[in-house]
């Protein structure tokens, strides 16, 4: 697990997320998993509120929250059922794919920033990229200062590793190498 191998001296390292360092991405990822769980459980989640700092050891917090998210998904009786979202009515399977994609992309961000690209699972990135290509609309893209969630797609070779193609699709520099890379 990438997050378990982040060392204290890497917390302030730059990431491919332009204004987020390793600590900010890790905090977002860990808290995001908990917010995902709450969403799956039918709770209202205000994604615009700041995420609190994660207390405790990151890997343990991520593992515990990911287990709770997995349990929440296991309790969903019908993945084709729809629910209301800011994007309108969406299926549970869409939500699951969105969550997988978010986790895969931020894992790449952390791996690229901390020299751990060898830890990435290409099959997960491939599935995430399939979902993203079908779902990410141009109106969600823009420069960092525009307030858009994703940057313009970056060029990448067709035969690049799947995690790098996913990163490029989400506007990351697929050649980003962190201080430990």
Image (cartoon, helix red, strand yellow):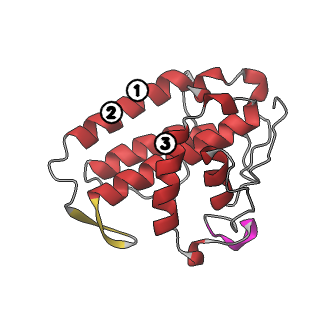
- Find residue 99 and report its horizontal and vertical position in percent: 43, 50
Answer with mark 1 or mark 3, whichever residue precedes in sequence.
Answer: 1
Marks 1,2: beta carbons within 8 A: yes
Q: Residue at x 74, y 31 (%)?
A: 114
Q: Is residue 159 left or right of residue 37?
A: right
Secondary structure type for disc 1: helix
Q: Is residue 76 visible?
A: yes
Answer with mark 2 or mark 3, whichever residue precedes in sequence.
Answer: 2
Q: Residue at x 26, y 40 (%)?
A: 72
Q: Residue at x 54, y 35 (%)?
A: 121
- Circle 1 or circle 3, nearest the eye: 3
Identify the residue under disc 2.
Answer: 68
Q: What segment is highlighted magenta in the picture?
A: 144-148
- Find residue 120 and report its horizontal and vertical position in percent: 59, 34
Secondary structure type for disc 3: helix
For the residues labelled 1 and 3, the Cα–Cα distance comes to: 20 Å
Q: Is residue 148 left or right of residue 8?
A: left
For the residues labelled 1 and 2, the Cα–Cα distance comes to: 6 Å
Tag shown at residue 124? 3
Q: Is residue 172 left or right of residue 57?
A: right
Identify the residue under disc 1.
Answer: 64
Residue found farthest to the bottom: 139
């Amino acid at each position: 697990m990438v997050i378990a191998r982040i060392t204290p001296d890497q917390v302030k390292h730059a990431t491919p997320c332009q204004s987020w360092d390793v600590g900010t991405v890790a905090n977002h990822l860990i808290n995001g998993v908990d917010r995902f769980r709450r969403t799956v459980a039918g709770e209202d989640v205000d994604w615009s509120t700041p995420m609190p700092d994660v207390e405790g050891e990151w890997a343990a917090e991520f593992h515990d929250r990911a287990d709770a998210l997995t349990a929440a998904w296991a309790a969903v009786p019908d993945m084709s059922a729809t629910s209301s979202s800011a994007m309108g009515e969406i299926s549970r399977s869409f939500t699951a794919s969105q969550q997988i994609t978010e986790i895969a992309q931020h894992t790449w961000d952390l791996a690229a920033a901390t020299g751990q690209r060898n830890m990435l699972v290409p099959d997960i990135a491939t599935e995430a990229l399939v979902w993203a290509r079908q779902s990410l609309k141009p109106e969600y893209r823009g420069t960092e200062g525009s307030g858009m969630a994703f940057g313009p797609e970056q060029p990448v070779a067709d035969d690049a590793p799947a995690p790098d193609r996913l990163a490029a699709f989400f506007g990351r520099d697929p050649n980003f190498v962190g201080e430990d890379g």
